[in-house]
Amino acid sequence: QVQLVESGGGLVQPGGFLRLSCAASGSIFRIYVMGWYRQAPGKQRELVATITTGGSTNYADSVKGRFTISRDNAKNTVYLQMNSLNPEDTAVYYCNAVIRSTDYVSNNYWGQGTQVTVSS
């Protein structure tokens, strides 16, 4: 059994910052790409950022220059540093990871989501 558990969401004023964390646990053999997605009310879930095992990153155009994704492979954890937040960043943020478990089966896993609200 593999789980992704997110933390770090909350309410922040425009221009503020938050740092999200997502820790993977369970019967993990190897973690491949990790990433963050978000879903705003009435909208589809969209990619925010991804990072490979080697550290290569990819960002949505809307967050480039403001958000930074990173990972600690020793801790099986991915982070999302979000700066210069604006109300359009309000959404539920989901952690995602492709993980091969100890039975050598690879699956795409999702966290439960953490709410980020940007409002004055």
Image (tube, rainbow, N blue to C red):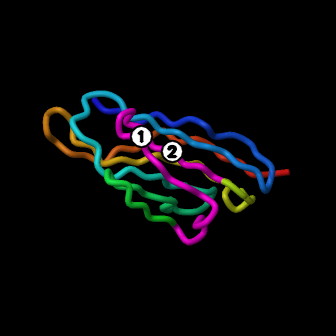
Q: Is mark 2 on a helix, strand or loop?
A: strand
Tell me where the magenta segment starts and ends, as one range: 60-82
* Image point (43%, 34%), residue name: 23
* Image point (32%, 54%), residue name: 54
The percent position of residue 36, horizontal first and vertical second, equals 48, 52
Q: Which mark is residue 72?
A: 1
Q: Which mark is residue 50?
A: none
Q: Is residue 4 left or right of residue 61?
A: left
Of 32 and 40, which appears nearest the observer? 32
Of 15 and 93, which appears nearest the observer? 15
Q: Which amino acid does label 2 sit on?
A: Tyr
Magenta stretch: includes residue 61: yes
Q: In this view, does 48 lie to the left or right of 32?
A: right
Please name which of the two marks, 1 or 2, marks the residue nearer to the observer: 1
* Image point (71%, 49%), residue name: 17
Q: Which amino acid does label 1 sit on?
A: Asp
The answer to the question of whether label 1 and label 2 lie on touching residues, with beta carbons closer than 8 A, is: yes
The number of callouts visible is 2
Q: Which mark is residue 79?
A: 2
* Image point (61%, 60%), residue name: 42
How far apart marks 1 and 2 lie (CA) works out to: 8 Å
The percent position of residue 47, horizontal first and vertical second, equals 48, 61
> Can you tell which quarter of the image residue 30 is in?
top left
